[in-house]
Image (spheres, rainbow, N blue to C red):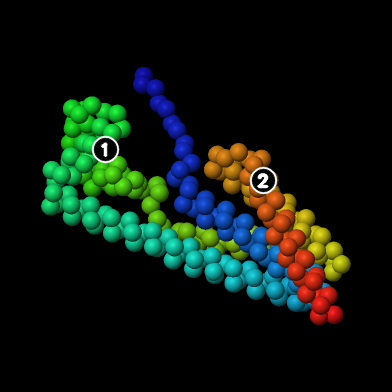
Amino acid sequence: MPLTHHETHRIDRIGWLRAAVLGANDGILSTASLILGVASAGQSYAAIIITGMAGLVAGAMSMAAGEYVSVSSQSDTEAADRVREATELANEPEAEREELIGIYVARGLDRQLAETVADQLTQKDALASHLRDELGLASVTAARPVQAAVASAAAFASGAALPLVIAALAPGDTIVWLVTGGSLLSLALLGAIGANAGGAPMLRAVLRVTFWGAFAMAATAAIGAAFGTSIA
């Protein structure tokens, strides 16, 4: 009986994982920083909540639009490369064959084997072979603008909801401390989840996201406190 070997790779997650982690991280950090800045300035409970809600909606829409535009640009470039490669294959098949052979020789195959591989792959799907081996384009890394936009908006909104809910439930004199603590814990958890999903070192990811999150929130709170003092 032939042995079966199944492998699970993480590269096929890269499109949505990058957008989701970035969106959730930005949602937690930017909304928590807004809330801390307004709270440190001595503003009312209503102003704090309204600011958090506005930050959630505006941030989610901004993330979706930004991801869609940037990933659409990548998709347009990939589409143009496909058209260009298809045209070259139709007009200069021998030159394209030699180009493919040269790629395989450079990777370590001898000339005869490189010719055999190039010819067989060309017979199966010439365009896919050139896109993959000449340009590095593959289906698992293809740009998907709508997917990236939806993932970014949903992730941002989910992340932003955490400090907003904490602020809504916290007693007025504890908002700053509870939002700070809850947001830092959320950032650490997000860093761990992202590292685990992407196969990266967990401790380094957690420390990195927590450090920069604490720095951003502290800076915003300091600015809010200074502004509130000057107004008073």
Q: Amino acid at mark 2?
A: Val
Residue 191 vertical placement versus 83 (above, below): above
Element type at marker 1? helix
For the point 34% across and 48% down, the residue is 137
Residue, x 52% and y 50% (percent of image)? 17
Q: Secondary structure at mark 2?
A: helix
Q: Earlier in the sequence, mark 2 or mark 1?
A: 1
Classify residue 157 as left or right of residue 163.
Answer: left
Counting from the top left corner in percent of width and height, residue 132 is at: 31, 44
Which residue lies under the disc numbered 2?
A: 206
Most extreme residue toward the right, as rendered? 173
* Quadrant placement of the C terminus: bottom right
| Nearer to me, 100 or 22 | 100
Quick check: 137 left or right of 101? right
* Residue 45 visible here: no
Residue topped by disc 1? 103
